[in-house]
Image (cartoon, grey):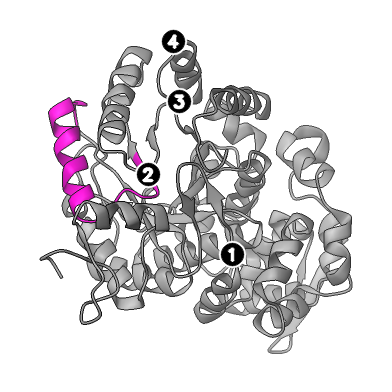
């Protein structure tokens, strides 16, 4: 089945849903690299028009990656909640956008989430302006719990990211202290290990858990090792709070990461069995990023933003505490400049939230991208308005282990103060008990004593 639309007197034809979605995508370097981007602005507009008129129900009948060849496609279609989808089954993609910007409210979106597929929300994002992406996401409420409560209205959490180039315990500890003093760490205290082996993992996990336990910090820790290493650590009795894994939107890209749905299910069950959460059992942490499938030659000719949304179906299966789009980390080959990074970050956040996920965004870029910290300030502010669940806290915004630019502890303080946001309630109470938070009436809504 083909699709078509006329723009400027020229009729543009799209062979299938895969091509329609790709051509409708606002331009980004990764789609051009893959050879799937629209050939002209006119073709892009035609694709967006055709997509706006496409019934949402069509996405249940045509897969962009074959069902027989891909376990992510099977997960998406086999787990679809027809009852949740039924109230909107009569709408087109354009009608869905109008409903979201109009009468839709938070309660309705929570009920709807299991009835949406990744391709539906990807299609929606392609006909949205930036303000639409912000406005729709701001209506979504996704609350998760482990040792504190994330995603409540009026809150903005921060992952404290104390990475060290050699996993030096003193370096990690110093950064943890720095972040806690600046109000970061309620989302998670999470270390990207320089060395991914079980001995190192257990050592760093022990350090983080000792700090958390000594000061009774109501948060969770994580060392972002491969899921197989974390499974080994759990077998050794290591204090694993959250199981981390990078994931993608096709079976082939997940295989390139060394994972499958069955392996993730095994790790999820093992983490649940530890019962380390005090307020809830959301114990998984996933990271994603537009372009990962293309970089692994596992994209099946699908545009990178649609594949990013399909990764969210994998995450949704395991009820995670946190999902993070590391939006600019993969480099300018996939998101060339600040403009492309900004749009991708807002797309990822809105699409993930609509699918029922606790979305955070690593507002970041690599040093060879056409972007700078002003671009990141703009995206951070937009995400704050859109209700992002959490952002990163990196000393000086410069990660010396991963060699990229992100957001600093002070950036987190800025956006909380500017938008009247607070940390997770349990973490805020801890900050106040420790004499670190100042919420007196003549001060900003969330200031760390003596700094703002």
Can you say which quadrant of the picture contains the N terminus? bottom right
Q: Position of residue 94 (x, y in %)?
A: 74, 78
Disc 1/disc 3 C-alpha distance (Å)? 30 Å
Give the mark nearer the N terminus: 4 vs 2.
2
Q: Is residue 130 above or below residue 31?
A: below
Q: Secondary structure at mark 1?
A: loop
Q: CA distance from mark 2 to mark 1?
A: 22 Å
Residue receiving disc 2: 218
Image quarter of residue 225 = top left
Q: Residues within 10 Å of mark 4 (few under 14, many from 20)?
A: few
Alpha carbon distance from label 4 to label 3: 16 Å
Residue tagged 4? 236
Q: Nearer the viewer, residue 291 or 449?
A: 449
> Rounded to the nearest whole Å, what is the CA distance between mark 4 and mark 2?
24 Å
Residue reaching furthest to the left: 450
Instruction: Indicate which label's residue lies in the foreground, 4 or 3.
Output: 4
* Mark 4 or 3, nearer chain start: 3
Task: Assess whether mark 2 and mark 3 are in contact (beta carbons under 8 angstroms).
Answer: no
The answer for how far apart the CA atoms under marks 1 and 4 are is 37 Å
Q: Residue at x 75, y 75 (%)?
A: 96
Q: Position of residue 274 (x, y in %)?
A: 53, 23
Q: Is residue 174 visible?
A: yes
How far across and down, in percent of the image, does residue 85 sit?
A: 83, 62
Disc 3 crowd rating (10 Å Cα; few below 14, some 14-19, many 20+) is many
Pointer 3: what residue?
A: 226
Furthest residue in direction front, as rendered: 433
Farthest residue, direction bottom: 8
Q: Earlier in the sequence, mark 1 or mark 4?
A: 1
Dot 2 alpha-carbon crowd within 10 angstroms: few under 14, some 14 to 19, many 20 or more: many
Residue at the (36%, 65%) spot, across then down? 422
Q: Which residues are magenta?
A: 165-189
In this figure, which residue is indicated by the disc labeled 1? 141
């Amino acid at each position: 089945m083909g699709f078509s639309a006329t723009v400027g007197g020229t009729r543009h034809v799209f062979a299938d849903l895969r091509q329609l979605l790709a051509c409708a995508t606002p331009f980004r370097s990764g789609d051009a690299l893959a050879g799937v981007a629209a050939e002209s602005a006119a073709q892009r507009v035609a694709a967006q028009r055709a997509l706006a008129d496409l019934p949402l129900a069509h996405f249940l009948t045509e897969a962009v990656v074959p069902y027989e060849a891909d376990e992510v496609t099977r997960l998406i279609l086999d787990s679809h909640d027809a009852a949740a989808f039924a109230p909107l089954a009569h709408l087109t993609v354009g009608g869905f956008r109008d409903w979201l910007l109009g009468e839709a409210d938070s309660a309705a979106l929570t009920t709807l989430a299991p009835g949406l597929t990744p391709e539906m929300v990807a299609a929606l994002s392609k006909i949205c302006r930036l303000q639409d992406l912000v406005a729709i996401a701001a209506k979504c409420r996704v609350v998760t719990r482990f040792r504190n409560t994330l995603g409540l209205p009026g809150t903005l959490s921060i992952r404290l990211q104390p990475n060290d180039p050699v996993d030096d315990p003193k370096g990690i500890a110093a950064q943890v202290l720095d972040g806690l003093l600046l109000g970061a760490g309620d989302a998670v205290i999470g270390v990207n290990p320089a060395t991914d082996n079980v001995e190192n993992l257990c050592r760093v996990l022990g350090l983080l858990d000792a700090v958390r336990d000594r000061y009774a910090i109501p948060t969770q820790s994580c060392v972002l090792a491969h899921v197989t290493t974390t499974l080994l650590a759990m077998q050794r009795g290591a204090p694993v709070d959250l199981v981390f894994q990078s994931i993608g939107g096709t079976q082939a890209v997940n295989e390139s990461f060394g994972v499958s749905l069955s392996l993730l299910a095994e790790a999820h069950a093992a983490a649940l069995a530890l019962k380390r959460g005090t307020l809830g059992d959301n114990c998984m942490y996933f990271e994603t990023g537009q372009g990962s499938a293309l970089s692994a030659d596992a994209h099946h000719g699908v545009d990178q933003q649609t594949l990013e949304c399909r990764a969210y179906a994998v995450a949704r299966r395991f009820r995670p505490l946190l999902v993070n789009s590391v939006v600019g980390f993969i480099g300018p080959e996939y998101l060339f400049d600040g403009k492309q990074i900004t749009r991708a970050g807002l797309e990822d956040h809105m699409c993930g939230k609509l699918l029922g996920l606790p979305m955070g965004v690593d507002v970041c870029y690599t040093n060879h991208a056409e972007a700078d910290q002003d671009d990141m300030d703009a995206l951070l502010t937009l995400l704050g308005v859109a209700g992002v669940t959490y952002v990163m806290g990196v000393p000086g915004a410069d990660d010396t282990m991963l060699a990229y630019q992100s957001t600093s502890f002070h950036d987190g303080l800025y956006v909380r103060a500017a938008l009247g946001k607070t940390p997770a309630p349990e973490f805020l109470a801890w900050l106040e008990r420790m004499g670190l938070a100042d919420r007196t009436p003549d001060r900003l809504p969330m200031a760390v004593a003596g700094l703002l």
